[in-house]
Amino acid sequence: MTRFHLGIGVPNAVFAATAGAIAFSFFANVWLRLAAGLLSGAAAALAALQTFLNPNERAAAHLNAGNKYEALNGRARIFWTVECWTDEPARVLTERLKDLALEKGRLNETCPQIPRWAYGQAKKVISDGEGTYSVDKPGRLSDRKAGVGAEESPED
């Protein structure tokens, strides 16, 4: 469950329970009846919002998209760190690279967009260097061609 889902669902349950308890109370106080009406209206609004936004389905769609991008990233990393250093002709490597680019384009077209705040947070994490691997650092290509660092781990 996401925080957003809990943030809507928990107050919805509390409002509905409170409104029901007050509505069936034996008090004739006008303020209690007004509170029951307001709480039941809020519960109905939150239930409608929860139904409309469907957070579980959206979370599943984003998880699926993230998994597909991660799989593509893995294939691209293998292409760069392994396949590019074989004796395959440039024509074959170019076709494989084009296939990876086409797959990325399809993912961009079909996967849900992330919210702006999530993009900003991810951009900050990347700019802070948390998503950098040694293979992504400058100068790595010349090291590979020279055969340096073959025994290094993927994340130095």
Image (cartoon, grey):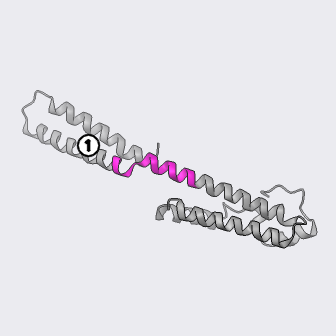
**Residues shaded magenta:** 50-65
Residue under circle 1?
43
The answer to whether residue 51 is magenta is yes
Q: Position of residue 102 (x, y in %)?
A: 65, 67
Q: Position of residue 89 (x, y in %)?
A: 87, 70
Q: Position of residue 114 (x, y in %)?
A: 50, 61
Residue type indicated by callout 1: Ala
Residue 10 appears in which quarter of the rendering?
top left
Q: Is residue 95 left or right of residue 118?
A: right
Q: Is residue 4 left or right of residue 81?
A: left
Please determine whether, in this image, residue 46 is positioned above or below residue 79: above
Along the viewing direction, whichever of 66 and 86 lies nearer the viewer? 86
> SS for tag 1?
helix
Q: Quadrant of the C terminus?
A: bottom right
Along the viewing direction, whichever of 9 and 125 lies nearer the viewer? 9
The structure residue drawn at horizontal position 67% and vertical position 68%, both measured from the top left corner, is 101
The structure residue drawn at horizontal position 64% and vertical position 63%, both measured from the top left corner, is 103
Residue 140 appears in which quarter of the rendering?
bottom right
Q: Is residue 17 left or right of residue 132?
A: left
Q: Position of residue 16 (x, y in %)?
A: 25, 37
The structure residue drawn at horizontal position 21% and vertical position 42%, both measured from the top left corner, is 39
Is residue 9 in sight in this rendering? yes
Please determine whether, in this image, residue 3 is positioned above or below residue 101: above
